[in-house]
Image (cartoon, rainbow, N blue to C red):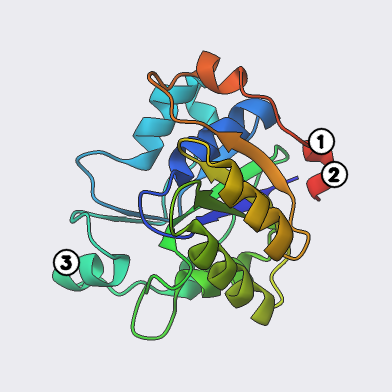
Amino acid sequence: MSFFVTGTDTDVGKTVASAWLMLHMNAQYYKPVQAGLEYTDKGTMKEITGLPDDHFHDCTYELEQPLSPHESAKRENVEIDINKFSLPETDAPLIVEGAGGLMVPLNDDAFVIDLIQKFNLPTILVCRSGLGTINHTLLSLEAMRQRDIKIAGLIMSGEKSPHNREALEQYAGGVPIIVEIDRLDHISAQSLLAIKPEIDLETLR
């Protein structure tokens, strides 16, 4: 049981959601493209989860500037080749975290959504709980449906907004809400493990 984790936008909470999934699934982690090396998502994941190094796979591309991958690569004279990506070989559940949202460019021709199609994993969409989430979430779901991507569910992130949740339950076409991760004063393995899934993760295959 492995998943690709994408978001409706940058800084929507994908890394915290990925850490939550890792902890509740005892999963491993792979970040195909890391743009920005001062603070890396893999480093943040290690710090949050406290899991050993063998749970974390190397990125395929590591780029210095914290920009869109295509721009960061361009500044380093690197060409991101989608054919160079392959899933790590592991028997464990795997969480694959994308960069930004679905239509973030990787090069002149390929976007994150193309990488999702290449990996062919069920995809979890992380969305904000607050204002704007309805439009962003429904647009992202529509883009995935147009590509026949299997949508496993939604993870809502941020201070809870019951009316937005109700709207997504009404308009998202039956996509389940896996969990709501409220704003946390301190993000740690303990605080994430205390947030229980709303549905059985085994049903998300």
- How far is mark 3 from mark 2, CA to CA? 42 Å
Residue 200, numbered label: 1
Question: Which marked residue is nearer to the observer: mark 3 or mark 2?
Answer: 2
N-terminal-most mark, 1 or 3:
3
Circle 3 sits on which residue? 76
Three-letter code, disc 3: Glu
Question: Which marked residue is nearer to the observer: mark 1 or mark 3?
Answer: 1
Three-letter code, disc 2: Thr
Residue 59 location (% of width, % of height):
41, 50
Q: Mark 1 touching mark 2, by CB under 8 A? A: yes
Circle 2 sits on which residue? 203
For this orientation, the residue located farthest to the bottom is: 109
Three-letter code, disc 1: Asp
x 77%, y 38%: residue:
201
- How far is mark 1 from mark 3, CA to CA? 43 Å
x 53%, y 29%: residue:
54
